[in-house]
């Protein structure tokens, strides 16, 4: 069983000792040990590329790990170096990796590497009717691999395929007939004996292979131009044809092409997206209305990646073309559609200091509802997302510890409001009871209660003034009524309550201060806001309740790290706030 870690992300320290520990606050992350954020730490680089929900509601993801043997074999001598290399080929290098986690606790249920004869990476995963898996990947020397596994990840069959040249896989598409379509790239053929030579025209070409449900190869075809073409993704249409998305690089630019092909691989139409700035194809999905959504990233005037989403129909007509502009470089690696037409996208956001995992929630009109960043002060990214049966999402990607050079496999579960799912099975019940308890305050738009059991104060009278931290009369009146109900409720379920956090926040400005000074001063201010609120709630209780509260109360300050923005513009008034969060055992 593989080793795993549920990482505790702490943003600040107790208000009473903030003067001593302020200098340590820059080393912070953003998840709690009760959150469903699971990092699988292997000795060398590892990463996850795809994720699914199993029929038993557990979660499975695939990617790669690296294994190296530090011990020299001494029991046999070799005169042929190629035989020696073959003898150690199974022991070391990059290997496909499958990880299965318990749906509630995050416990690792399966941790299996492929140990194939050639180094390989797993890129894609789909389900079989028997709760098994199709795994798609490629070897490091350029062959594409299709595996079929049972529910315990035991091998049923393995298929290696591709041209005589270098091939790579980008996705494995599950088809309505139970088969799969492999999408990737292949370097161009230079031999007339290769049957794919006729359509292998450029440096790299789009490579498609279709398999039946029993693993029979039905056809393989290449498509492309005389330039560098790479297959990125595909999706099956309702009529059995396929929409294929690819990129073409020429004259230092990269453009995107949509191609519709028939079920036997014959081309029906092409549509190109060409412009002066490079654009990158990421993902295409079929929507419930039988139209399609394409996720792209494109370079803006500042040479930063920006998200672009294009909705189109089967006849290549563009229905909606939406750009999500931010001040940072960002892109979506994967998108999925909810049953109500909403969209979730995951990827990365990058600034001058680090890269964070990105989650974006959109409505059916592609208007942004939520955006959240996750990770630490290094390199973190989500590569794939799965929508779960209860409308939560599971994200898979890579996490890198601060001051580390080795990547780790990362799986996170989030609620639909882009907040962490708590591993406690009691959280959904407590959430429903809190919503009922505060129905009046929610209806009057004084507070919002999220599924991660965080409570946000959103009434304009509950925000703090610029540089202010003392509670106003309106804030005290609200807290009297609010805390009376909350503390009584929590005390009733005290066996389940681990922590009640009181978190303070600020807007980003601080007059006549450098970047470093502004951050530290805002950190102190956010902690003062937390302390004043915590102090008022604490001293409003009777002696017996105070004794219990000393075991669960915790004050934290977040400076301006979680400032409120809309369309990438900071709302300074709403950023000056406090919020609460309940952490369960």
Image (cartoon, helix red, strand yellow):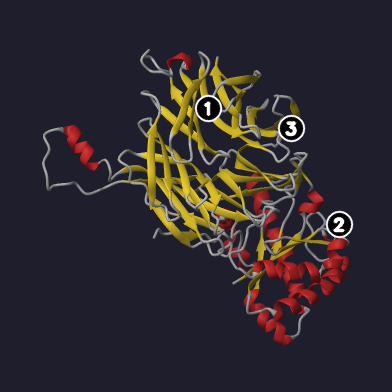
Q: Position of residue 535 (x, y in %)?
A: 73, 73
Q: Residues within 10 Å of mark 3 (few under 14, many from 20)?
A: some
Horizontal relation, residue 400 to residue 139: left or right: right
Query: Alpha-carbon distance for marks 2 and 3?
Result: 31 Å
User: Residue 96, percent across and down?
Assistant: 40, 44
Q: Is residue 378 visible?
A: no
Seen in the picture, residue 258 relative to 382 is either above or below; the reply is above
- Find out whether the residues at labels 3 and 1 contact each other: C-beta distance under 8 Å: no
The residue tagged 3 is 322
Vertical placement of 52 versus 535: above or below? above
Q: Position of residue 166 (x, y in %)?
A: 39, 26
Q: Residue 265's mark?
A: none
Query: In the rendered image, is residue 99 in sight?
Result: yes
Task: Tell me the quadrant of the picture where the N terminus can be found.
Answer: bottom left
On residue 231, which mark appears? 1
Mark 2 and mark 1 lie on one chain; the one further toward the N terminus is 1
Badge nearest the viewer, 3 or 1 = 1
Disc 2/disc 1 C-alpha distance (Å): 50 Å
Is residue 514 or residue 267 the one in the foreground? Answer: 267
Tell me the number on the disc at residue 460. 2
């Amino acid at each position: 069983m593989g080793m795993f870690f549920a990482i505790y992300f702490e943003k600040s320290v107790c208000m009473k000792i903030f003067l001593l520990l302020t200098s340590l606050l820059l080393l912070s992350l953003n998840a709690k040990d009760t959150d469903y954020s699971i990092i699988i730490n292997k000795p060398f680089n590892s990463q996850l590329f795809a994720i699914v929900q199993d029929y038993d509601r557990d979660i499975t993801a695939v990617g790669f790990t690296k294994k190296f043997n530090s011990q020299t074999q001494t029991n046999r001598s070799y005169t042929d170096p190629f035989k020696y290399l073959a003898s150690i080929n199974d022991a070391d290098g990059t290997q496909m990796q499958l990880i299965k986690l318990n749906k509630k606790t995050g416990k690792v249920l399966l941790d299996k590497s492929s140990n194939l004869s050639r180094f390989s990476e797993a890129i894609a995963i789909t389900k079989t009717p028997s709760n098994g898996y199709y795994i798609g990947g490629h070897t490091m020397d350029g062959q594409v691999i299709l595996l079929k596994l049972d529910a315990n990840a035991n091998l049923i069959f393995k298929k290696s395929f591709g041209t005589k040249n270098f091939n790579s896989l980008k996705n494995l598409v599950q088809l309505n007939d139970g088969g799969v379509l492999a999408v990737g790239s292949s370097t161009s053929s230079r031999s007339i004996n290769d049957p794919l030579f006729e359509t292998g025209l450029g440096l790299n070409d789009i490579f498609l292979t279709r398999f039946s449900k029993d693993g029979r190869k039905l056809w393989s075809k290449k498509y492309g131009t005389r330039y560098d073409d790479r297959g990125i993704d595909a999706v099956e249409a309702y009529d059995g044809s396929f929409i294929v998305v690819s990129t073409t690089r020429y004259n230092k630019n990269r453009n995107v092409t949509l191609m519709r092909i028939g079920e036997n691989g014959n081309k029906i139409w092409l549509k190109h997206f060409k412009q002066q700035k490079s654009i990158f194809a990421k993902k295409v999905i079929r929507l419930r209305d039988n139209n399609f959504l394409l996720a792209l990233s494109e370079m803006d005037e500042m040479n930063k990646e920006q998200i672009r989403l294009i909705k189109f129909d089967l006849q290549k007509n563009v229905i909606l073309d939406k750009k999500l502009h931010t001040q940072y470089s960002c892109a979506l690696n994967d998108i999925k559609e909810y049953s109500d037409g909403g969209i979730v996208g995951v990827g990365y956001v990058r600034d001058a200091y680090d890269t964070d995992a990105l989650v974006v929630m959109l409505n059916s009109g592609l208007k942004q509802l939520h955006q959240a960043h996750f990770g630490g002060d290094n390199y973190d990214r989500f590569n794939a997302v799965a929508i779960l049966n209860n409308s939560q999402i599971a994200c898979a990607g890579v996490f890198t510890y601060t001051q580390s050079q080795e990547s780790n496999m990362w799986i996170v579960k989030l609620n639909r409001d882009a907040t962490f799912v708590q591993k406690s099975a009691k959280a959904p019940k407590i959430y429903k009871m809190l919503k009922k308890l505060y129905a009046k305050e929610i209806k009057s738009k004084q507070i919002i209660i999220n599924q991660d059991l965080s409570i946000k104060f959103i009434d304009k009278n509950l925000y703090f003034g610029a540089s202010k931290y003392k509670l106003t009369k309106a804030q005290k009146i609200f807290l009297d009524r609010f805390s009376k109900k909350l503390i009584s409720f929590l005390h009733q379920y005290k066996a389940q309550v681990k922590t009640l956090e009181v978190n303070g926040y600020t807007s980003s400005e601080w007059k006549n201060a450098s970047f470093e000074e502004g951050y530290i001063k805002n950190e102190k201010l956010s902690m003062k806001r937390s302390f004043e609120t915590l102090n008022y709630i604490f001293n409003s209780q009777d002696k017996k309740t105070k004794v219990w509260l000393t075991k669960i109360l915790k004050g934290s300050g977040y400076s301006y790290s979680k400032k409120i923005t809309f369309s990438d513009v900071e709302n300074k008034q709403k950023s000056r706030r406090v919020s609460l969060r309940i952490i369960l055992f």
